[in-house]
Image (tube, rainbow, N blue to C red):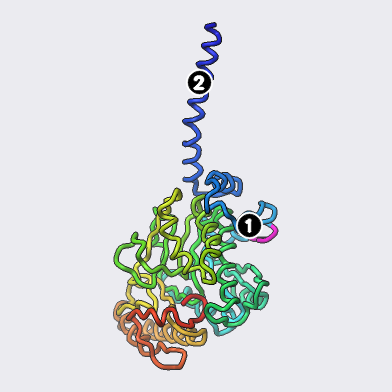
């Protein structure tokens, strides 16, 4: 009898210990900063049968299928990543990668920025068509072909066209795979000029750090207007789930682009069991044409958002780049004075699609939502 009681007591003890260990194990999985496919699948299966369990086809691929779809990516990422496992990612089609187009300006901005030329070595350029891949390989060591065959994405696709939407959504599938392979990434549109090192201003405590078209002064406020043309994601099980849910949510808000869908679901991601911590970037440091500031002596990046047409993006960013180089080569100026004078020149150069000057620094929602060109408005 005593033996049975002893055995029963041991059984209860074992059950208690198992019950105590399971939550600890789940917390460990959620906190992991490096995500394997197996861990990700365990986490996703634990979320139950709610809306997050509705998976689009590519989000539920086996490891072998993922490896086949993203062939060579796992071998390429270690060559590109920084010491802490972070990869800068941008994407181009043939029009944006052509000589004299946005890719050339993008790369030149690193070379002429303040101590950021080395970051080009950690930049993965994703080509979405063979023409873009050919142009990329001619100028850059780290190129990856993610061919989009469902639409013609090679030309300067207009905002909200079918080909444009296919292009912006295709990039998310690759970014999800980057996270699953255990790498953090900073995605940047190719129409973003880099001036200084942005990593100095990216919070280590955030799951996702996002640039803004309009910054309201509170970096953690969900009321900020996000711009997914520049954002950082830390590799964890929870952020893999961000990308999965983001892609699934496309069907809830058709037809629209990734940025609009993200804006719709960001509060859900912050409030539900994921408890995602978002940080939004100040436009005084991560500037753009939507909310342009008077000085550039601290600006890390300049985004050609609220600028209409690929030709005008190239023109305006080209003028900005040229003016900045000219001022920086003048003798006797301080850096702050040079940057301030560059701002004056830029304000005279930005044009609309009809060639008329645009007023930058004043937010215009009609301009932002008009027929804007790629990569992001």
Residue 227 image label: none
x, y percent for residue 71: 68, 60
Q: Which residues are magenta?
A: 68-73
Mark 1 sits on what residue? 74
Q: Is residue 86 visible?
A: no
Q: Tell me which residue sits at (47%, 89%) in the image.
A: 353
Q: Tell me which residue sits at (50%, 54%) in the image.
A: 239
The correct choice, above or below, for 355 with respect to 16 in the image is: below
Cα distance, mark 2 to mark 1?
46 Å
Which quarter of the figure has residue 99?
bottom right
Of residue 140 and residue 70, the one placed in the foreground of this image is 70
Q: Is residue 229 visible?
A: yes
x, y percent for residue 297: 32, 75
The correct choice, above or below, for 276 with respect to 7 in the image is: below
Other residues around mark 2 within 10 Å, as few (<14) / some (14–19) / many (≥20): few
Q: Tell me which residue sits at (33%, 61%) in the image.
A: 221
On the rendered structure, is 165 left or right of 370? right
Q: Quadrant of the N terminus?
A: top right
Mark 2 sits on what residue? 12
Tell me the SS state at disc 2. helix
Tell me the SS state at disc 1. helix
Choose mark 2 or mark 1, whichever is in front.
Answer: 2
x, y percent for residue 144: 63, 67
């Amino acid at each position: 009898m005593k033996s049975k009681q002893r055995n029963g007591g041991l059984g209860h003890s074992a059950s208690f210990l198992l019950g105590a260990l399971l939550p600890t194990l789940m917390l460990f999985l959620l906190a992991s900063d490096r995500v394997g496919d197996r861990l990700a699948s365990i986490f996703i299966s634990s979320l139950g049968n709610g809306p997050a369990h509705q998976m689009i086809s590519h989000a539920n691929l086996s490891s072998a299928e993922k490896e086949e779809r993203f062939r060579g990516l796992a071998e390429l990422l270690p060559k590109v990543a920084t010491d802490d496992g972070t990869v800068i990612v941008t994407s181009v089609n043939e029009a944006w990668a052509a000589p004299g187009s946005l890719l050339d300006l993008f790369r030149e901005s690193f070379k002429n920025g303040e101590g950021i030329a080395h970051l080009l070595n950690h930049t993965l350029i994703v080509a979405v068509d063979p023409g873009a891949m050919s142009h990329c390989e001619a100028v850059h060591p780290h190129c990856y072909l993610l061919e989009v065959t469902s639409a013609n994405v090679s030309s300067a696709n207009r905002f909200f066209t079918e080909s444009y939407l296919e292009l912006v959504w295709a990039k998310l599938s690759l970014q999800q795979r980057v996270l699953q392979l255990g790498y953090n990434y900073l995605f940047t549109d190719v129409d973003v000029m880099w001036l200084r090192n942005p990593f100095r201003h990216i919070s280590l405590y955030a799951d996702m750090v996002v640039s803004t078209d309009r910054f309201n002064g509170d970096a953690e406020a969900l009321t900020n207007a996000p711009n997914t043309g520049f954002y950082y994601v830390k590799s964890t099980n929870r952020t893999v789930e961000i990308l999965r849910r983001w892609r699934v949510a496309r069907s809830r808000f058709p037809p629209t682009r990734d940025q609009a869908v993200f804006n719709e679901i960001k509060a859900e991601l912050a409030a539900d069991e994921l408890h995602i911590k978002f940080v939004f970037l100040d436009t005084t440091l991560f500037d753009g044409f939507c909310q342009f500031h008077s000085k550039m002596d601290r600006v890390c990046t300049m985004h050609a958002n609220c600028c209409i047409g690929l030709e005008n993006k190239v023109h305006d960013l080209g003028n900005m780049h040229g003016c900045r180089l000219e001022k920086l080569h003048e003798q006797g100026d301080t850096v702050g004075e040079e940057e301030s004078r560059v701002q004056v020149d830029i304000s005279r150069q930005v044009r609309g699609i009809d060639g008329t000057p645009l007023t930058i620094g004043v937010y215009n929602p009609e301009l932002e939502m008009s027929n804007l060109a790629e990569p992001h408005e």
